Image: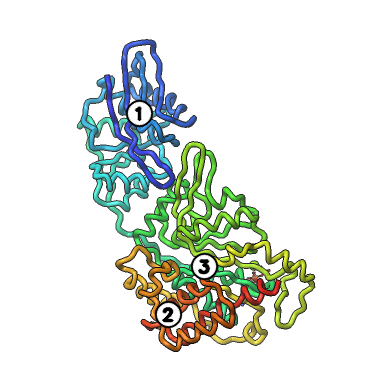
Amino acid sequence: MFIKVNSMGLRGVEPFLVEVEADISKGMPCFDIVGLPDAAIKESRDRVKSSIKNNGYEFPLSRVVINLAPADIRKYGSFYELPILISILKGTKQLECDVEDSIFIGELSLRGDIRSVSGILPMVVKAYEMGIKRIFIPEENSLEASFIDGIDIYGVKTIDQVILHLSGGRELEKVKHNKKFKKDITYPIDFSEVKGQFAARRGLEISAAGGHNALLIGSPGSGKSMLAKRLPSILPDLTFEEAIECTKIYSISGMIDKEMPIISERPFRSPHHTISPAGLSGGGTTPKPGEVSLAHNGVLFLDELPEFSKISMEILRQPLEDQFITISRVSGSVVYPSSIILIAAMNPCQCGYFGHPTRECRCSSNAVSRYLARVSGPLIDRFDLHIDSTGVEFSDLSSDKEVETSLEIKVRVDKSRDKQIERFSKTKICFNSRISPGQLREFCILTDDATSILKRAFENLCLSARAYDKIIKIGRTIADLDNSDDIGKTHILEAIQYRSLDRKYWQKI
Ligand SMILES: Nc1ncnc2c1ncn2[C@@H]1O[C@H](COP(=O)(O)OP(=O)(O)OP(=O)(O)O)[C@@H](O)[C@H]1O
Ligand SMILES: [Mg+2]
C-alpha cells in the first residue's frame, strides 16, 4: 500500500515541500527511512513506533519503507515524525481521511505528545504562499505561527488530537490570527547620557537614517562603545515584513522567545572579538545562521575591530556587498539574508592616542602601521562614515545642560526614513546606503554649488571613485534629515567630513 503525506523541510531560511511517502508491503518486518535523512531523522523510527504503540494503535508487522522526497536534498531535524506517523496509520487503514491539502510538522515523544520544533514561521509562510489550505504544527509553536493570516493553522498537543480531528471525531480549534506584532519598546540606555561628542552623535544619526555603515575611531574612554550601544534607540521601527524576515532567522536558530515569538525590534548583535569565523558567518554540519544573519535588518556592532581575526573580518565583505551570505557545505549550499548596518569601533593604535590633539602616542610608527594594517583596506572602504571620536571636553562632561534624548533624534530619523520609503517605492531598495551607481543620477541631484565643492574635494583630497559615491549617498541622507529634495552645499560639506579618517590615520602609515 502506498501513501503520501505532505510536510516541509528547510534549506537555510528557505523551506521546501517534502512528500513523506510510505510503502507498506508484505515481507520481513522492517522500518526504513530513505531520502537523504540525517542521523537525527533515523532516530525518529523509535519515536514513531513507540507513539503508535503507546496510543493503542498497531505498528504493522510488515516491510515499512518511508521515502522523504525530493531525495536529492539532505533533510535535517525532527519535523517529519508526525507526517511519518500519519502515513503509517493511513497505510494500515487505522486512519481514513483525505490529507492532500494539508501539511504536518512535528516531533513526537515516546508517549505520542507533539513537541515543538525550530523554523515553524518560515514553513507556515511557505505553506501559505503555496496555497496549502491547512497546516498542523506543534501547539507550542502556535503563537509564532499566528502572525500569518490566510491559512488554517492547527496547533496540536498529542497525536490523539490530530487523529480525532482528521477522522471527524473532535474538531480542533484553529489558531487565531495575531495582528499585534509590536511591543512597547523601552531602552534602558539613552543618547542623553552621552555628553559632548556632537560629531559622533550626528554621525550615528546619519547612519541610522540612511542605513550607512560607520567606523568609530578614537582614544580609550572617549565613549565609542557607549555611543554605538545607544544606536538601537534611534533606529526606525521594524515594518511587519522586516519583522517576519528577522523572525524566520531566529526561528530556524531556535532563538525565539516563547512569550513574544516575533522579533519586533531591530536586532543589535555585538559578538566578542574572539568569535570564530563560523560563528560570524554561520555554519556547522547542520548550517545555522551566524551573527551576520542574526543582525539582518539591524546592526552588527564589532567593538575593538582590529582584535577580530583576519578571516572573520574578510567574511564580512560578501554580506556587506550583497546583503546575503552563502555557506557551502558538502551537503549543498545555503543562503542566509544579511542586510546589516555594520558599526565598528577601534583605537587608532595599541596605546590608543595616535592622532590625539593633546596626549602623546607611545607607539612607534611601525607599531601604529602594524595595528592599523590589521583592518584591511577593502573593509575600511565599506564604511560609509568614518566617525572621529576624540576625547570629551571637561566642560561638556561637567555641564548640567540638557542633552538631546534618543526620542528626539529618532523623530528626525523616522521622518527621513519616510522620505526614503517614498523615494524608493518603485525600486527594490529602501535606504540611501543601498543606492546603486546606476541610480545615483536619478535619486541624488546636487545643486551647482554642491557639485563644484565636490569637484574641488575630489581633486584636492585625492578621493577614490568609491569615496565619491559614498559622499553623495551620505549627502543624500543629510539632505533628507534636513527635509531637502536637492543635495546642497552644506550637505556635501558635512558629508565630506565623514571621509576624513582614512586620510588622518591610514594615509599617514
Ligand atoms: N561622552 C561621554 N559622556 C559621558 N560619559 C562618557 C563619555 N565618554 C565616556 N564616558 C564614560 O566612560 C566610560 C567608558 O566609555 P567607553 O567604554 O564607551 O569608551 P571607549 O571609547 O569604548 O573606550 P575603549 O577604546 O577603551 O574601548 C563610559 O562607560 C562612560 O561612563
Ligand atoms: Mg570600547
Number of labelled discs? Answer: 3
Q: Position of residue 336 (x, y in %)?
A: 45, 50
| Left or right, 317 with reference to 150 | right
Which residue is pictured at 58% across the width and 63% down the height?
378
- Give the labeled residue for mark 2: 481
Q: Amino acid at mark 2?
A: Leu
Q: Nearer the viewer, mark 3 or mark 2?
A: 3
Which residue is pictured at 58% across the width and 75% down the height?
387
User: Which quarter of the frame holds ligand 2?
Assistant: bottom right
- Does residue 316 sit above or below 20 in this rendering? below
**Quadrant showing the N terminus:** top left
Q: Marks 3 and 2, Cα distance to the nearest angstrom?
A: 17 Å
- Give the labeled residue for mark 3: 213
- Give the labeled residue for mark 1: 84
Whether residue 81 is visible to the viewer of this picture, yes or no, is: no
**How are the residues colored?**
rainbow
Q: Residue furthest bottom?
A: 449
Q: Position of residue 156 (x, y in %)?
A: 32, 38
Which residue is pictured at 41% across the width and 60% down the height?
264
Q: Nearer the viewer, residue 395 or 347?
A: 347
